[in-house]
Amino acid sequence: MPQDSTAPWAVDALGALAHATRLAVFRALVTAGPDGMIAGAIAGHCGVPPSTMSHHLAALERAGLVQSERESRQIHYRADFAGMRRLMTFLMQDCCQGVPEMCGDPIPGLACEPPFDPLREPAGGD
C-alpha cells in the first residue's frame, strides 16, 4: 500500500464508527444538526447508560467526528461536519481515476430534506 494512501486520522475516524453504538450516536448527532444534543438525551435516544455513553462520545470526539461544549452542568455534543466532510473527501478523492463519468453521483441517496413520508399531505394540499 502506498504511504500516501493512508492517513492515521482516517483510520481513527473509521475505527470510531466501526462500533454499532458509536455509529448510532454519530447518526443521531448528524440528524440533530448544528443544535446537537446533550449527553443525557443521546444516552436515552440510544438506550445506553450515561457512563457508557461518555466513553463512546469521547471516542468520537478524539476521532474528529464530534465536538463538545460545556453548558453549565451539561455537555452539549454536535457532529463535527467539517470532520465528516474531511473523511468523506478522503474516501472519495480517487474514485473516478480522472474520469468523473465513472463515479456519477457519488452519494445518490443524500438529500438535505426530510425523508419522504407517505402519510404526510403533499405541499399545496393536493
Image (cartoon, rainbow, N blue to C red):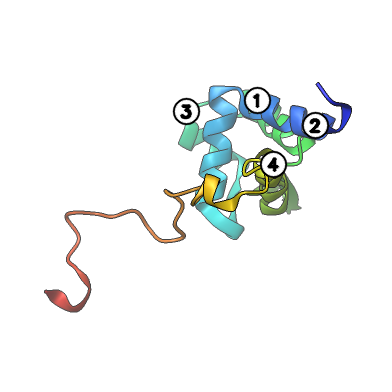
Is 8 in front, or is 91?
91
Residue in the picture at 16% in, 55% down: 119
The residue identified by callout 4 is 94
Horizontal side, residue 116 vs residue 20: left or right: left
Q: Mark 2 or 1 closer to N-term?
A: 2
In three-dimensional space, the C-alpha distance between marks 3 and 2, rounded to whole angstroms, equals: 37 Å
Q: Give the residue type at disc 4.
A: Asp
Q: Quadrant of residue 3?
A: top right
Tell me how far mark 3 sits from mark 1, CA to CA. Answer: 12 Å
> Which residue is labeled 1 in the image?
51
How many other residues sit within 10 Å of disc 3, few (<14), some (14-19) or many (≥20)? few
Residue 87 lies, with reference to residue 126, above or below; the image says above
Residue to which mark 3 is pinned: 47
Local packing at callout 2 (Cα closer than 10 Å; few below 14, some 14-19, many 20+) is: few
| Residue 118 coordinates in the image, percent (x, y) | 18, 54
- Type of amino acid under label 2: Ser
Depth check: 41 or 90 in front?
90
- Which residue position holds label 2? 5
Q: Could you say whether the residue bearing mark 2 is in a helix, strand or loop? A: helix
Residue 76: percent from the left, percent from the top? 66, 49
User: Helix or strand or loop: what does disc 1 sit on?
Assistant: helix
Disc 4 and disc 1: Cα gap in Å? 40 Å
Q: CA distance from mark 2 to mark 1?
A: 36 Å
Q: Are marks 3 and 1 in contact (CB under 8 Å)?
A: no
